[in-house]
Amino acid sequence: MAEAARRAAAGRDRARKEPEPSLGKRLGQIGILGWAIVVPMLIGLFVGRWLDRTFESGVFFSAPLLMVGAVIGFWSAWKWMHRQ
């Protein structure tokens, strides 16, 4: 029982020292994550469309480069989240 009380007191102290981030900060983090995912996808799509127009190949390059951009975007967002 005494150990549980100590843990609860330590949790309250930790909460006072490190308060929960504000709503604005959370929304900013969501925005950063969104752009971290979307920008590599758009770059992949832009390069893929350029290659498709150059080689007249339909969507041969656009689709795979869009997926590569998505993978890079999700990976970078995951790494950013674990650093925060």
Image (tube, grey):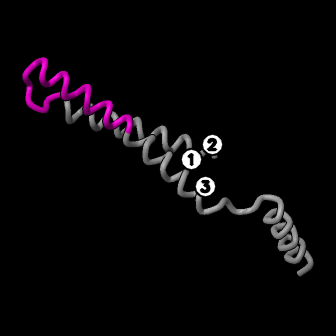
Residue ID at (33%, 37%): 41
- Of residues 24 and 29, the one drawn nearer to the viewer in this rendering: 24
What type is the residue that disc 3 sits on? Lys
Q: CA distance from mark 1 to mark 2?
A: 5 Å
Magenta-highlighted residues:
39-61
Name the residue carrying label 2.
Answer: 83
Q: Which mark is residue 25?
A: 3
Drawn side of residue 56 relative to residue 17, left or right? left
Residue at position x 50%, y 53% in the image: 30
Q: Crowdedness of circle 2 by 10 Å Cα count: few (<14), some, many (20+)?
A: few
First along the sequence among labels 2 and 3: 3
Task: Look at the image and say whether residue 10 sits in the magenta stretch.
Answer: no
Query: At which x and y percent is residue 7?
Result: 85, 70
- Residue hosting label 1: 81
Mark 1: secondary structure? helix
Q: Quadrant of the N terminus?
A: bottom right
Tag 3 or tag 1, which sits nearer the N-term? 3
The dominant secondary structure in magenta is: helix
Q: What residue is shown at x 59% (from left), y 45% (from top)?
A: 82
Q: Which image quadrant for residue 6?
A: bottom right
Percent position (x, y) of residue 35? 43, 43
